[in-house]
Amino acid sequence: MDSKDAQLKVMAQAVYELRGLLSGYLGNRNPETLCESVSAHLAYALHNEALAINEDRPEDFNLDDAINKIKCVDEMYGEQFGERFQNLISDVKT
């Protein structure tokens, strides 16, 4: 495994772990824990893609689907993650 693949797997595992740690905040609309709720939904939106990376299943990671999941979090919480993520991959074709 080259260094870039190892880095990607570490980041994917972090997303997967965050999904579990923040799961108690899913659906929560408490203003005092809004940051945790948004984080929980963002991690939840991408946890299957993170698992696909770590299990070497690239065919199960569709960039367009991932961006659309992120945009759903934007709609729920009035964020703009989708645009930032889209900009990261604007030169990549699926």
Image (spheres, helix red, strand yellow):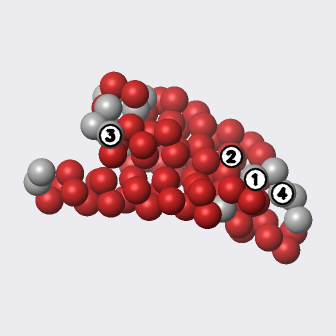
Q: Nearer the viewer, mark 1 or mark 3?
A: 3
The residue singled out by tag 4 in the image is 28
Within-10-Å neighbours for mark 2: few <14, some 14–19, many 20+: many
Q: Quadrant of residue 14?
A: bottom left
The residue singled out by tag 3 in the image is 55
The residue singled out by tag 1 in the image is 26
Q: Position of residue 85 (x, y in %)?
A: 48, 48
Within-10-Å neighbours for mark 3: few <14, some 14–19, many 20+: few
Distance CA(mark 2)–CA(mark 3): 25 Å
Distance CA(mark 1)–CA(mark 2): 11 Å
Asked whether the viewer can see residue 39, the reply is no
Q: Position of residue 35 (x, y in %)?
A: 72, 68
Residue at 30% in and 53% down: 9
In the rendered structure, which amino acid carries the disc numbered 3?
A: Glu
In the rendered structure, which amino acid carries the disc numbered 1?
A: Leu
Q: Earlier in the sequence, mark 3 or mark 4?
A: 4
Residue at 83% in and 57% down: 28
Q: Secondary structure at mark 2?
A: helix
Q: Earlier in the sequence, mark 2 or mark 3?
A: 3
Kindly check if marks 1 and 4 are in contact, taking CB atoms under 8 A apart as contact.
yes
